[in-house]
Image: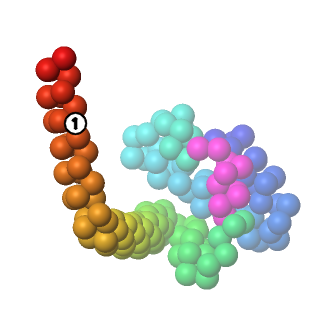
Amino acid sequence: MDEFLKQLRRELSMELNQEEVQKHVDYYYNYFQVEKKSGKSEQETLQTLGNPKWIAKSILNASDAFARGAYEASTQRTDSNTNASKGNIKTVSKTKIIMILVIIGVIVLAGVFLVMTALWTIFRLLLPILVPLIVLVVAFAVIRNIINKQK
C-alpha cells in the first residue's frame, strides 16, 4: 500500500498542486482501509486497483466537469463518505458506459439497415438481367450435358 500511495503521489505531483494530490492520496488510503475492514487483503486491493500510474493518468485526464465533480465529491476523508462516494463513481461510469453502448447499438443497427437496403435495391435492379442470364446458363448446361451424353 505504501509503495502504491508513493507512486500515486509522485505521478500526480507532476501536474497537480499539493492540496489536490493529498486529496487523491487520502482517498486511496481510505479505500485501502475500507477494503481491509471488509476482509480483503492488501494484495487483493492492490490487484483490484491496478497500476497507480494508470490511476494517476485517469485522474489527470478527467476533463469533463461532471466526472471531475463526482470524483472530487468521493474524496472525502471519512469512511462513511468514502463508502457512499465509491457508489457515485461506479454509477457515473456505468451510466456513461450504458449510454455509449446504446449509441453504438443504434449506429450499428442503422448501418445494418442501410447495407440491407442497398443490397435489396441492387438485387431489385439486377433481377431483370440476372433471371434471363441464369435461365440461359442453365439451358446451355443442360444442352451441353445432353450433347456430351450422346457422344
- Residue 67 coordinates in the image, percent (x, y): 56, 75
Q: Which quadrant of the view contains residue 94?
A: bottom left
Number of numbered discs on residues: 1
Q: In the image, which residues are magenta?
A: 50-59
State which quarter of the image contains the N terminus: top right
**SS type, badge 1:** helix
Q: Which residue type does callout 1 highlight?
A: Ala
What residue is shown at x 65% (from left), y 70% (from top)?
62
Query: Which residue is the site of mark 1?
Result: 141
The residue located at (22%, 36%) in the rendering is 141
- Residue 15 painted magenta: no
Kindly tell me whether residue 91 is visible in this rendering. no
Main SS class of the magenta portion in the image: helix
Q: Nearer the viewer, residue 73 or 127?
A: 127
Q: Is residue 132 visible?
A: yes
In the rendered structure, the answer to whether residue 33 lies left or right of residue 103 reads right
| Residue 43 position (above or below residue 135) | above
The answer to whether 25 is drawn above or below residue 89 in the figure is: above
At which x and y percent is residue 104? 42, 68
Residue at x 82%, y 71% (from the top left corner):
17
The quadrant holding residue 55 is bottom right
Residue 135 locus on image (x, y percent): 19, 51
